[in-house]
Image: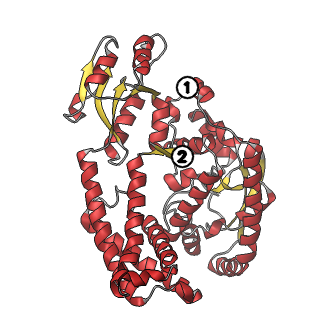
């Protein structure tokens, strides 16, 4: 497995992205060889740099058009449509780059032939990769030990994510499973004890055992698991495996001991310094650059509905310190007059006409750059919440207070991974992602979240 941004991915997934990049890169080289007269075309050493630029832009557009989400591109028709959209976007971006930097131009003929080769190669590469996934080639065989809810969550995730890199070969359980839901290839072993675990694992070709028991105290088969470990079979705790599989925690099934002894939650001075420095520099630059947008939006809000331009509301920040958060007003001024504090929801009828637009494209968040500059917020972190809701959520959700160990953010792992939420159930799911972020906080993870936020804003999804 390959660890990227504190989450684990099968090495084959990284090779898939790298291989596709090489196909795109060599499409330019091949087009140059065909159109410019063989090996003589390669005398221009800049062709390699031009091909690299072409590749970076194309793969960026593939990413932003969800072509690396195999759940979305699971049909050939959807793949074809999204591929053409991504290559069209690539052509537009490259046209702007070529206009600004003419020395980067690879030539119209080479560009057209390269695009044609890319279409053929990418489709063939992806069809082949899908075939590999469907056959389960190179999957790691795992065994589930237990019948807890977390065990069933792990099973569901592995079944759903075709490219997760794991295949459950057997389940050993004292408790009840609905065996009718299990595929025929998964062997269910009902037992009164956990003897012969190693034999079952070796017979199934399993090299990884996931321990997801309902109760470990007094029931954990220490001797048997130790024997497996000595024989080279990896033994993982259920919550830890779920974390690296999904990029989130699951608060309903966590215990304090796991949180205390698991890795993570480090916030070294260098990380705090780099994060704060980035917040100051970027927020200052954006506040200056966006002045024209601020003026235009302010005028439109004033013309659209009665009330102030800015909406100010107390939120709770790091270490539970209250602060006033600023946003462009997107709702009526009497939005909570009759109901009191309520969660905002999708298609909220309290939102004004201009409010729908600025909320969809995150323009209403621009004034919070001032909160970032002042140090009350960060660019990346859990979304800030109101004290009224915090009291309710802390009573209903375990570990909710962990969110206050970091500054709230304009965007966050929960926002780019889950989207809109307007209930306690949604708050629990968002906390699962927030805790993963807090536990695995890093500069590179922040950069990845920013990149995914840009994607969300461009396509007008999420909140």
Q: Is residue 389 left or right of residue 105?
A: right
Q: Secondary structure at mark 2?
A: helix
Residue 214 in view: no
Image location of residue 110, percent across then percent down = 39, 85
Residue at figure coordinates x 32%, y 20% from the top left: 173
Which colour scheme appears in the figure? secondary structure
| Residue for badge 1 | 255
Image location of residue 135, percent across then percent down = 23, 46
10 Å crowding of disc 1: few (<14), some (14-19), many (20+): few
Q: Are marks 1 and 2 in contact (CB under 8 Å)?
A: no
* Nearer to us: label 1 or label 2: 1
State which tag comes first along the sequence, 1 or 2: 1
Q: Quadrant of the N terminus?
A: top left
Q: Secondary structure at mark 1?
A: loop
Front position in the image: 143 or 248: 143
* Furthest residue toward right: 374
Q: Is residue 413 left or right of residue 172?
A: right
Residue at figure coordinates x 42%, y 65% from the top left: 21
Residue at figure coordinates x 52%, y 75% from the top left: 49
User: Marks 1/2: CA distance?
Assistant: 18 Å
Front position in the image: 455 or 135: 135
Q: Quadrant of residue 152?
A: top left
Image location of residue 103, percent across then percent down = 56, 87
| Residue for badge 2 | 430
Is 124 drawn above or below residue 33 in the view shown?
above
10 Å crowding of disc 2: few (<14), some (14-19), many (20+): many
Q: Quadrant of residue 20?
A: bottom left
Specify the label residue 282 is tagged with: none
Residue 98 in view: yes
* Furthest residue toward left: 184
Is 120 drawn above or below residue 318 in the view shown?
below
Image location of residue 132, percent across then percent down = 27, 51
């Amino acid at each position: 497995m390959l660890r990227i941004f504190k989450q684990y991915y099968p090495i084959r997934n990284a090779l898939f992205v790298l291989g596709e990049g090489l196909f795109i890169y060599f499409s330019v080289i091949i087009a140059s060889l065909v159109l410019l007269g063989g090996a003589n075309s390669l005398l221009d050493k800049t062709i390699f740099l031009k091909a690299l630029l072409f590749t970076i832009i194309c793969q960026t557009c593939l990413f932003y058009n969800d072509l690396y989400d195999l759940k979305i591109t699971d049909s050939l028709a959807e793949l074809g449509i999204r591929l053409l959209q991504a290559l069209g976007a690539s052509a537009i971006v490259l046209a702007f780059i070529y206009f600004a930097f003419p020395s980067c131009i690879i030539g119209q003929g080479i560009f057209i032939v390269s695009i044609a080769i890319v279409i053929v190669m990418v489709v063939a590469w992806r069809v082949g990769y899908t075939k590999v996934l469907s056959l389960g080639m190179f999957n790691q065989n795992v065994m589930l030990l237990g019948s807890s809810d977390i065990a069933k969550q792990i099973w569901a995730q592995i079944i759903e994510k075709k490219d997760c890199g794991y295949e459950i070969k057997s389940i050993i359980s004292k408790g009840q499973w609905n065996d009718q839901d299990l595929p025929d290839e998964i062997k269910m072993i009902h037992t009164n004890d956990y003897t012969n675990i190693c034999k079952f694992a070796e017979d199934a070709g399993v090299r990884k055992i996931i321990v997801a028991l309902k109760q470990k105290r007094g029931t954990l088969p220490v001797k048997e698991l130790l024997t497996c470990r000595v024989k080279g079979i990896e033994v993982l705790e259920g919550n830890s495996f779920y974390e690296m599989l999904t990029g989130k925690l699951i608060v309903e099934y966590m215990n304090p001991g796991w949180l205390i002894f698991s890795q993570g939650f480090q916030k070294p001075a260098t990380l705090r310094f780099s994060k704060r420095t980035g917040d100051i520099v970027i927020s200052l630059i954006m506040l200056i650059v966006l002045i024209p947008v601020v003026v235009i939006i302010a005028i439109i809000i004033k013309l659209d509905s009665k009330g102030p331009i800015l909406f100010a509301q107390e939120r709770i920040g790091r270490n539970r310190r209250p602060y006033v958060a600023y946003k462009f007003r997107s709702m009526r001024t009497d939005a909570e007059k009759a109901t009191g504090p309520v969660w905002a929801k999708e298609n909220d009828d309290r939102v004004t006409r201009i409010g729908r637009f600025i909320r969809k494209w995150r323009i209403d968040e621009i004034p919070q750059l001032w909160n970032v500059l002042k140090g009350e917020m960060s660019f990346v972190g859990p979304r800030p919440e109101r004290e009224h809701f915090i009291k309710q959520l802390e009573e209903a959700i375990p570990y909710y207070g962990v969110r206050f160990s970091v500054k709230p953010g304009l965007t966050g792992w929960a926002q780019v991974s889950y989207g809109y939420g307007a209930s306690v159930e949604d708050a629990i799911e968002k906390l699962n992602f927030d805790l993963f972020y807090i536990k695995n906080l890093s500069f590179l993870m922040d950069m990845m979240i920013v990149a995914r936020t840009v994607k969300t804003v461009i396509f007008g999804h999420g909140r």
